[in-house]
Image: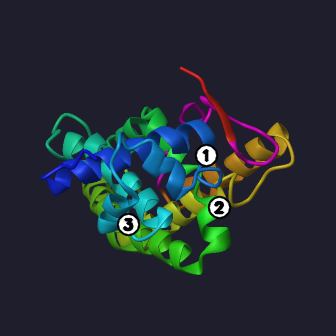
Amino acid sequence: MPRNKYPEETEQIILDAALKLFIKNGYEQTTILDIVDEMGGLTRGAFYHHFKTKEEVFFALIDKLFNDIEPFAKIGARDDINGLEKIKLTLQILNESEEYTVLHLQILPLIESSPTAFKIYMEKQRTFLASKYAELIEEGINDGSIKAKYPKLTAELFLLICNVWMMPTIYPQANEEEAWQRFNMAKDIIDFLGLPVLDKTLTSHVVINDQGIVVEIKK
């Protein structure tokens, strides 16, 4: 049986196999055995050497895709745009990644079956993303493009609305009209906070069915 003497390469093979299956079949429909079968001859032992659960693979993929996209690094050195424009550009960069968008919308099976997964998801929102957005909000306050009063709290509430309350896999909408009602209400709330960053172009390319599952990413 082929073996890979470089652990980081073996881990990459596992992540590549899992990503292919999660995109094609969805998280819930993919088993660890499916991933192993997709690993080009590597064994189940190789999988468990790097990951204990399918859940761990999922979050490792989310982290890797985010790090590959590097939205904050790409906008960090920009001095030609203000704080508000940097946040809008960050959101645009993330939404342009089809793989990241599809995976991020598969959170529901994890948090329904595992309180630990939900805790991990929320912790990542609070400790990493919120701090990054808070820095940009503070920059926007200083340059006058953002009117928010409390950068840290505004960032936390912004992420809670966008990544939990607006997630169709967490709060399924009955139809397209209800989905847009939710979006418009979220926009009103975030605008009221002094952070007018939500734009319909951020969600118009994602097609979701009645069960809150992504069925198409329109180019």
Q: Is the magenta stretch mostly helix, strand or loop?
A: loop
Placement of 34 over or under 118, stated as above or below: above
Which residue in the structure is indicated by mark 2?
A: 109
User: Is the residue under label 2 in contact with that under label 1 (CB below 8 Å)?
Assistant: yes
Which residue in the structure is indicated by mark 1?
A: 26
Q: Residue 130 carries which label?
A: 3
Q: How crowded is mark 1: few (under 14 residues within 10 Å), some or many (20 or more)?
A: some
- What's the magenta region? 195-213
| N-term-proximal mark, 3 vs 2 | 2
* Residue nearest the viewer, comparing 7 with 200: 7
Image position, residue 144 (x, y; %): 31, 51
Image position, residue 138 (x, y; %): 29, 62
Tell me if I can see residue 3 in this picture: yes
Placement of 153 over or under 92, stated as above or below: below
* Residue nearest the viewer, comparing 133 with 122: 122
Does the segment drawn in magenta span residue 198?
yes
Residue 89 falls in which quadrant of the image? top left
Residue at the image point whose x is 36% and y is 54% from the top: 43
Q: Given the current orientation, which residue lies at the most extreme top position? A: 219
Q: Residues within 10 Å of mark 3 (few under 14, many from 20)?
A: many
Q: Distance between the residues labelled 1 and 2?
A: 10 Å
| N-term-proximal mark, 1 vs 2 | 1
Does the segment drawn in magenta span residue 192?
no
Residue 15 falls left or right of residue 209: left
Q: Distance between the residues labelled 1 and 3?
A: 28 Å
Image position, residue 52 (x, y; %): 41, 71
Q: Distance between the residues labelled 3 and 2?
A: 24 Å
